[in-house]
């Protein structure tokens, strides 16, 4: 099969064997997949990952021991736990110390014709959700994770830093929670997408004289956390969404003096994401900025690397 | 009156006028005061403070409009709010944006013969509590602040990083909460104080192969937060207690990937601290490593700066 492999700091489109399924797994034929900012960070060295890239996808099950799965259109959670540790046994496989993570840690990803995944990671995609929309299940779930982690009160004043793909999804989720939602970014075109949904926007660099109950850092860059600590109220909450390669120089005392609560936030609930997509409560089509075949991977990544672009998809099977 | 003034990066014992009280204030004759790590950080540039140092004290009210306060032995909260902002009006004067903080921000401190404070900041010290013990009200309140901020469950495995003054107080508080409490430090003598109270200790540098539900950073140094992030479990909580001058280089992605919750923690409840001191539930006398007059300030600070020393007191009136 064709697969987009990252090795020795280079991407190449290789012909590799179709992976074989284990007892509890399904073989999935990938329909579409999306390029995430984490993929871009992996190219810079994040997680030291080598292998097939990609973790946002929708596909069709073509092989599984339990035959009822065959032919089902599915999306898949990306964390694969050991099934035995205190985390796996308490429903938190995302934090299993020996987990694998699709396209990120010790597990080949979805920029390929096929992928294997444990059946327990799969969710059937409702017919109403198109392939393009289904690819957004994983990042939308990540946006929804925030609502599981902190108490969000109606009318909380929330600032999302970053008008990238995840920032636009989080902004829509916060608006759904009836928060007074602001998204700060530097791309007028992207902010316009939110303005069309009655979400307030702030152009980065302009003077902002108010402070926020909750600030969500989704800039994908090192400066984001400093901005978050600047704009959050004393005793306010900061959510960190961005993972990136490298370190940050930070004034920790401001967290102490202002008694800020900072929470890291990663993967979230697929079932809730699928429900929002099915009910059209979160709109994702305006976030798609291009679709390419695997053979066009150079062009696809060239587009994805441009800061003015939003989601770039691969059309695979 | 005699006062220990920090100005132009130098401490000097000066003769200054006794401060005059405003309508809502009391004039307090200082009995004893304690040197805190924050005082040491101020000498390095923290908060750019200039004025009379010191914020841990016990004294006698000698002047106040409401005569019933005169002669009372008191301790005092160190934050003075404007009384009008959203923070002051919701009982959070500690976060008033225009607050003054005794010996730290725009308000003269307690290393002097007299201090003024709003009556609303004062707490009468029960007779059972000696002057020496009463000086610990402020740092013990700061230790207790943690219990107001995060849910602490019985049997939570808690690590306190740092065997300094505040670390030893926090360790005793966590033990009182029925946590499985460990204190990590590098001074055998200090750790021995906790061992005598049946609190587990870990000598820094030794291999620690387990992880903790809650890690409280009280090392007073830049490396503390890195250690905290190393020893906390995924989805665990980190409390930051140390304020220090300077910045830290940090791998923020580990907070995101492990979904750590980090909370800054500052000043706490004086009433609860006094109750614990009165009931002898927290023992502080073994933490006193010397007592000096204001005239002996050079010797006092020389001792306080030694990392093997615990609390150094001033005996003032």
Image (cartoon, coloured by chain):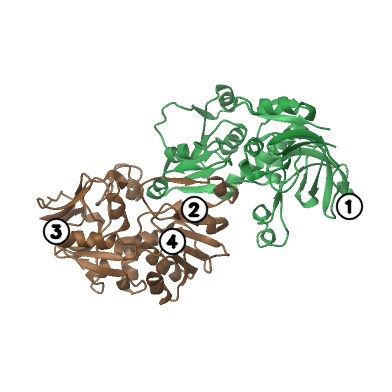
Chain colours: A green, B brown
How far apart marks 2 and 4 lie (CA) works out to 23 Å
Q: Tell me residue B84's x, y (percent).
A: 29, 43
Mark 3: few/some/many CA within 10 Å (<14, 14-19, 20+): many
Mark 2: few/some/many CA within 10 Å (<14, 14-19, 20+): some
Residue A254 is drawn in which quadrant?
top left
**Tags 3 and 4 both on a single chain:** yes
**Does B227 sit above or below residue A29?**
below
Q: Can you see residue A286?
A: no
Indicate which label's residue lies in the foreground, 3 or 2.
2
Q: Which residue is mark 1?
A: A65
User: Which of B153 and B247 lies nearest the eye of the viewer?
Assistant: B247
Question: Mark number for residue B147?
Answer: 4
| Chain letter for mark 2 | B
Q: Which residue is mark 3?
A: B113
Q: Secondary structure at mark 3?
A: loop
Quadrant occupied by the C terminus of chain B: bottom left
Q: Can you see residue A72?
A: yes
Question: Mark number for residue B226?
Answer: 2
User: Which of B50 and A155 lies nearest the eye of the viewer?
Assistant: B50
């Amino acid at each position: 099969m064709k697969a987009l492999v990252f090795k020795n700091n280079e991407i190449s489109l290789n012909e590799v064997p179709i992976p074989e399924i284990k007892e509890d797994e399904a073989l999935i034929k990938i329909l579409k997949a999306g390029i995430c900012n984490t993929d871009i960070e992996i190219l810079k060295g994040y997680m030291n990952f080598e292998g097939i890239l990609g973790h946002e996808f929708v596909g069709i099950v073509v092989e599984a021991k339990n035959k009822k799965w065959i032919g089902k259109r599915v999306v898949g959670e990306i964390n694969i736990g050991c099934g035995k540790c205190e985390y796996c046994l308490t429903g938190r496989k995302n934090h299993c110390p020996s987990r694998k993570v699709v396209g990120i840690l010790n597990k080949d990803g979805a920029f390929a014709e096929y992928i294997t995944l444990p059946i327990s990671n799969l969710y059937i995609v409702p017919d109403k959700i198109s392939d393009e929309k289904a690819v957004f299940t994983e990042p939308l779930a990540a946006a929804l994770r925030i609502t599981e982690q902190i108490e969000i009160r109606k009318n909380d004043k929330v600032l999302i830093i970053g008008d990238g793909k995840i920032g636009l999804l989080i902004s829509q989720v916060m608006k759904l929670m009836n928060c007074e939602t602001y998204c700060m970014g530097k791309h007028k075109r992207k902010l316009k997408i939110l303005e069309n949904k009655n979400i307030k926007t702030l152009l980065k660099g302009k003077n902002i004289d108010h402070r926020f109950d909750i600030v969500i850092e989704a800039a994908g860059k090192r400066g984001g956390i400093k901005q978050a600590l600047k704009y959050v109220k004393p005793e306010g909450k900061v959510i960190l969404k961005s993972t990136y390669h490298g370190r940050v120089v930070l004034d920790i005392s401001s967290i102490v003096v202002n008694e800020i609560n900072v929470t890291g936030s990663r993967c979230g609930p697929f079932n809730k994401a699928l429900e929002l997509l099915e009910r059209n409560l979160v709109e994702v089509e305006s976030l798609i900025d291009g679709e390419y075949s695997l053979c066009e991977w150079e062009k696809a990544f060239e587009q994805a690397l441009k800061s003015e672009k939003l989601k770039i998809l691969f059309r695979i099977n």
